[in-house]
Image (cartoon, helix red, strand yellow):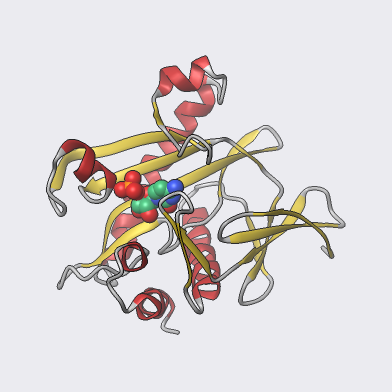
Amino acid sequence: AVKTEQMYEGKAKKVFRTDDPDLVIVSYKDDATAFNGLKKGTIVGKGVVNNKVSNHMFKMLEKEGIKTHYVEELSDRETLVKNVKIVPIEVIVRNIAAGSISKRLGIPEGTKLATTVLEYSYKNDELGDPMINDYHVAAMELATKEEMETIADYALRVNQIMGAYLKQFDIELIDFKLEFGRYKGEIVLADEISPDTCRFWDSKTGEKLDKDRFRRDLGGVEEAYEEILRRLMGA
Ligand code: C5P
């Protein structure tokens, strides 16, 4: 596929059309934002890490039977993916309390949740991605009941597979966000899986190896991203 015009520029990625209408190229940027775009910065090398980590995860998940948008890594920052239509729902899976659930429900960070928690947010920048449930999804016709069953099943399976996979690298999967797309009538896992979209804590020391280092000004941001890439791929 040959890259043609830019289709879209998001906070962390650009998407380009190709000469094949079924395929697009995503290009990962070093730009970092937090708190719905209120905090802006650059994390040098982030685009490369997120591209490689995402592709590594998608390939691993495909082997486990999860359908994803991944097609082929083209370069350090660019990947060929299926031209999906994104379902405007952010799917969050939580194993251990951190971030917004700790704030909202008063559960101290690091508390193991008695059961996995699945949350949905309506993907809408102006509204600040408000939390919604299956009734809101149905009322707004964001997805069908069947699609939501597939999405929930995929999200919980991704949690199982990824949680077990990361343990061997001494990485604890605290929580993460997924996005899904529609492609030729099927739901497929899309967007990215990276230190931008997951909370990764060192299993032994509890050290944060994810975007919280940027959000909370903890320092060592670039090093944390590089460390995740090194543990997964030995880079
Ligand atoms: O902020 P909160 O605790 O709700 O985030 C839960 C998880 O979802 C974190 O891993 C965070 O990185 C991810 N997330 C995301 N994009 C958002 C909101 C949350 O990747 N817009």
For residue 62, side relative to residue 214 (left or right): right
The residue located at (36%, 75%) in the rendering is: 221
Res 177 visible = no
Question: Looking at the image, is 1 positioned above or below residue 97?
Answer: below
The residue located at (37%, 64%) in the rendering is: 211
The residue located at (84%, 53%) in the rendering is: 20
Q: What x and y, as percent, mark residue 35?
A: 40, 51
Give the camera-side residue of 160 and 204.
204
For residue 73, side relative to residue 48 (left or right): right
- Quadrant where the C terminus sits is bottom left
Res 37 visible = yes
For residue 118, side relative to residue 204 (left or right): right
Q: What x and y, as percent, mark residue 70?
A: 61, 57
- Quadrant where the N terminus sits is bottom right
Spot the residue most to the front: 38
Q: What x and y, as percent, mark residue 208?
A: 26, 68
Question: Looking at the image, is 194 positioned above or below residue 230?
Answer: above
Q: What x and y, as percent, mark residue 81?
A: 67, 56
For residue 58, side relative to residue 79 (left or right): left
Give the tally of numbered discs.
0
The residue located at (35%, 35%) in the rendering is: 119
Spot the residue most to the bottom: 235
Question: Looking at the image, is 200 positioned above or below residue 220?
Answer: above
Spot the residue most to the right: 19
